[in-house]
Image (cartoon, rainbow, N blue to C red):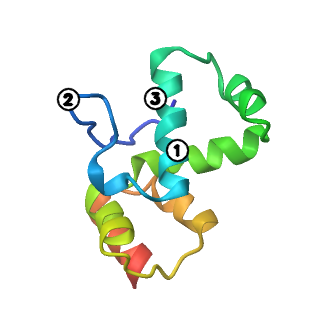
Amino acid sequence: MPAAGLIPVRETASGQPPALAVGSPATNGAWGWRQRLERGDVATLADLAADEGLSDRYVSRLLRLAWLAPHVLERLVVHREPSTLSIYDLCFVASLPWDEQPGRVFD
């Protein structure tokens, strides 16, 4: 589950990620993993990583993308604005308050 203090992005009524998150392999993977954890399909990140054939560390880091601010996701995925950060660094930005994320991602 996400680190304490993170505010999850709201899902649509169907339980799917918002449309702005659709289309990016990284955000789609993170959303799918988040949903599997929330539904109880897997009990731990280690179980999820084993199912995906990935390392626990990689899954843990990439999962953070599911908690990026909605306006950051929109700018990245819908408007395809370039980020000054790599996917690796973007994963750490997700732990920041939503109002601080754009300045770190786009400046």
Give residue 65's mark.
none
- Give the mark nearest the N terminus, 3 or 2: 2
Q: CA distance from mark 1 to mark 2?
A: 19 Å
Where is mark 2, residue-wise? Answer: 13
Amino acid found under the numbered disc labelled 2: Ala
- Write the residue at 63% across / 64% down: 88
- Give the mark nearest the N terminus, 3 or 1: 1
Q: Is there any visible trace of residue 69 in the rendered image?
A: no
- Give the quadrant of residue 94: bottom left
Give residue 35's mark.
3
Q: Helix or strand or loop: what does disc 2 sit on?
A: loop
- Give the quadrant of residue 98: bottom left
Q: Is residue 71 above or below residue 34?
A: below
Where is mark 1, residue-wise? Answer: 30
- Write the residue at 48% across / 48% down: 28
- Give the mark nearest the N terminus, 1 or 2: 2
- CB under 8 Å between discs 3 and 2: no
* Mark 2 residue crowding within 10 angstroms, few (<14) / some (14–19) / many (20+): few
Q: Is there any visible trace of residue 36 in the rendered image?
A: yes
- CB under 8 Å between discs 1 and 2: no
Q: Helix or strand or loop: what does disc 1 sit on?
A: helix
Amino acid found under the numbered disc labelled 3: Gln
- Horizontal placement of 50 versus 22: left or right? right
Q: CA distance from mark 3 to mark 2?
A: 14 Å
Percent coordinates x, y for residue 97 in the rendering: 34, 56
Find the residue positioned furthest to the left.
13
Q: Is residue 9 above or below residue 90?
A: above
Assign the C terminus to one quadrant of the image. bottom left
Q: Helix or strand or loop: what does disc 3 sit on?
A: helix
